[in-house]
Amino acid sequence: STFSFTIYNEHLNTLRGSILEDGVPSTSKHGQARGLPLKEVLEYLVPELNVHCLRLALNTPKVTDQLMKLDEQGLSFQRKVGIMYCMAGQSSEEEMYNNESAGPALEEFLTLLGERVRLKGFTKYRAQLDIKTDSTGTHSLHTTYKDYEIMFHVSTMLPYTPNNKQQLLRKRHIGNDIVTIVFQEPGALPFTPKNIRSHFQHVFVIVRAHNPCSDNCSYSVAVTRSKDVPTFGPVIPEGVTFPKSSVFRDFLLAKVINAENAAHKSHKFRAMATRTRQEYLRDLAERHTTSTPIDPSGKFPFISLAHKRKEKSRPYLGAELRSLGAVTWPVHAEDHGSGGELEALLAVSNEFLILVDQEAKAVIFNCATKDVIGWTPSSPASLRIFYERGDSVSLRSISNNTEDFKEVVKRLELLTKGCETSEMTLRRNGLGQLGFHVNYEGIVAEVEPYGYAWQAGLRQGSRLVEICKVAVATLTHEQMIDLLRTTVSVRVVIIPPHDDATPRRGCSELYRMPVSEYKGSSSDSGSFEYKFPFRSNNNKWQRTSSSPQQSLTASPQPHTPNRAISLGSSVGKTLSAERLERGAVIPRSVSSDGRPLDTKRFGSFFKQRSVDGICPEAICCYLLSEL
């Protein structure tokens, strides 16, 4: 069984997780119908928590409603947006509020933006508009976009008061909207937010019409925002006007929705949200709890004197490694961009493997757990994990804790189809051949039966991930073949195939390309038949008697990415000079020999794999580490 938990705090963070009962040390027997004592579960989850101050909550609808409000805080999909009308020659707030009715250009824009709805009896999101007595006007503009519902406060649709320059009935709604669209007719004066006397309007989206009410109608867009509102997308192309179309409508609606989302990240709105959350939590703690403590056995201490104190049973070894949620370990990760190390938190869940920079609170690496194809325990306190097509990330345990990576490997064995890599040195036969074929992916397509490669343990379907300390993922097919042909002593790191001789592939690779099938023949010769992209059975092993010098001077055959290459070239001492020259164009893996990758081609490894912001998995991992 599993314990699920949700932790709320006053800093707008909510932690949700679960823990297997078998992973909790307890004085009670695991697997019972009544479960383990809640006190012991909490003490194990949050050792810093004073469980004696906790009280059981009331089982009432009010408690459920308060918890729902906490969960829904910041998750509203309803938006209210103001629209101010600026005619030719106007620029001030007072002038815009006093435009009694809409002109043809504004009517055309409103028709594109949404649907004109009757307020009386309106059943959808009303955005504080009166839907009973028409006190806020008879009609308004409403629309939906993606999962959002938007009600517009259009200045010309709100009640107009003659001889009232303030137009408070209009300003009462638009002045309290976080995002406001300022629609400008041709000839309108430049807009400045300094003319707006409102402390609540944080973002203005200025839309200027060009050639309105014609076939060439188009719009230009600009944005002004408060200083503490972060930037938001979609990006407005410089010097571009948008033709009147559904594409422009989608762009504008996405812009105003993201504008409000960005405004909620500002200091002012975060402070307001924090105060609201504190009130919810205080109300729950003070008004909706019983007097029952978390450990009711404390009321009868004399009972425990008659019995020997029970010792807590140990949790089942490795029980947490089978959890669907993220399990975390502190590690040092190699940064290929700087050649140094970065202290991070490794988290492996049922779906993702990520590295989190705790100091920056950012994800610096992420891949799907099903993309992991193998791993190499470089030493008891270091680990290299291969993913997708042979890319890798190198990790080192903090304080040389050898047990950490044993747990990581066990976790990967349970969640992935990968396996531990093998390292072997390949010898050449009398003709200088290695005795196997490899395709453009670095996958062994055929091994000469009982040859040196076969005797070393190389099998069909093995994936080469490193050749002579060079990562295969950084090589082109030609570079890989060239390195295998021209190296005297070939030392490779491989990921063994599955039991059915198919190569290990990440899930992303399976989606990107068709899976190639291996088909063994029933003959005793050990020959194989392959489908694309593996070597055809018609290609025989090349048995050349040419000398090393002749092999070197022979013109290279063109290599195509959909054909396996025979590694039959000979090697001589005279190749050393040419190998040094080629070495300059073969980028080497930092994790192999300590030298950084070619930054022009590959860039920083972590920069490539980083994502913008922290995903839910990363937040969960980070908070778990804080606990």
Image (cartoon, helix red, strand yellow):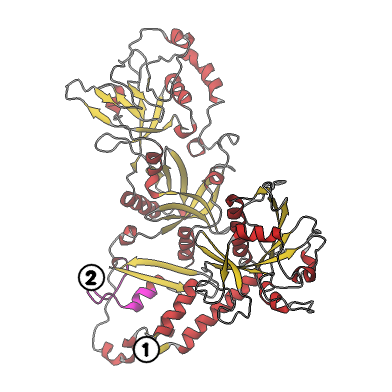
Q: Which residue is mark 1?
A: 292
Of residue 167 and residue 566, the one placed in the foreground of this image is: 167
Res. 312 image quadrant: bottom left
**Vertical side of 229 occupied by 609: above or below:** above
**Vertical side of 403 occupied by 273: above or below:** below
Magenta region, main secondary structure:
loop
Give left or right: position of 74 versus 410. right
At which x and y percent is residue 625?
Answer: 47, 63
Of residue 393 and residue 614, the one placed in the foreground of this image is: 614
At which x and y percent is residue 495?
Answer: 35, 37
For badge 1, the amino acid type reads Thr
Tell whether label 2 touches label 1 (CB within 8 Å): no
Labelled disc at residue 31: 2
For badge 2, the amino acid type reads Gly
Of residue 517 and residue 121, the one placed in the foreground of this image is: 121
Lower position in the chain sequence, tag 1 or tag 2: 2
At which x and y percent is residue 162?
Answer: 77, 78
Give left or right: position of 558 versus 28. right
| Residue 49 seen in render | no
Q: Residue at x 51, y 20 (%)?
A: 579
Task: Tell me the CA gap for discs 1 and 2.
Answer: 26 Å
> Which residues are the magenta region?
23-43
